[in-house]
Amino acid sequence: MARTVKCPSCGAELTVKDDNRDFMFCEFCGTKVRLDDYQETHRYVNEAEVQRVKAEKELELKRMEAYTKREEQAGKQFITLMSICLGVALFCVLISRFM
Ligand SMILES: [Zn+2]
């Protein structure tokens, strides 16, 4: 199957006649056009992988953040509960002293 490449210089659609060559010359402006788009494909795949890993890390970070927030909230609730208990206990002690 013949594939086409775009000339980076003049933008002409060039038909690749020999797929085994890694470059050809534009028949319109004579620019050397690289045909080994493997590198580009490879880079694209790597970028996708990087994006995936980044998204995963962000998700992990968000999960950890949510967890920390939950822990913080639980801690605050515990402190509030403890201070209420302490207040009630102190109140009871004071009441029993004056009775
Ligand atoms: Zn050209």
Image: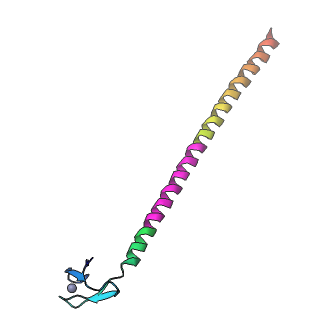
Residue 95 visible in the displayed image = yes
Vertical placement of 60 versus 17: above or below? above
Instruction: Please give left or right for residue 40 compared with residue 92 in the image.
Output: left
Quarter assignment of residue 34: bottom left
Which residue is at a point 79% across and 17% down the rendered structure image? 93
Give 19 or 94, whichever is nearer the viewer: 19
Instruction: Please give left or right for residue 20 compared with residue 56 in the image.
Output: left
Q: In which quarter of the image is the C terminus?
A: top right
Q: In which quarter of the image is the N terminus?
A: bottom left
Which residue is at a point 22% across and 82% down the rendered structure image? 14
Instruction: Please give left or right for residue 8 compared with residue 57 in the image.
Output: left
Give 9 or 45, whichever is nearer the viewer: 45
In the image, farthest residue toward the right: 97
Quarter assignment of residue 13: bottom left
Q: Where is residue 90 in the image (x, y as percent from the top left)?
A: 76, 21
> Magenta segment, which residues?
47-68
Q: Where is residue 32 in the image (x, y as percent from the top left)?
A: 28, 89
Vertical placement of 64 versus 82: above or below? below
In magenta segment, residue 52: yes
Give 3 or 1, whichever is nearer the viewer: 1
In magenta segment, residue 88: no
Q: Please, which colouring scheme is shown?
A: rainbow
Give 86 or 10, whichever is nearer the viewer: 10
Q: Where is residue 82 in the image (x, y as percent from the top left)?
A: 71, 28
Vertical placement of 29 versus 87: above or below? below
Residue 32 visible in the displayed image = no
Which residue is at a point 58% across and 48% down the rendered structure image? 64
Quarter assignment of residue 21: bottom left
Q: Position of residue 76 (x, y in %)?
A: 63, 35
- Quarter of the displayed picture in which ligand 1 can be seen: bottom left
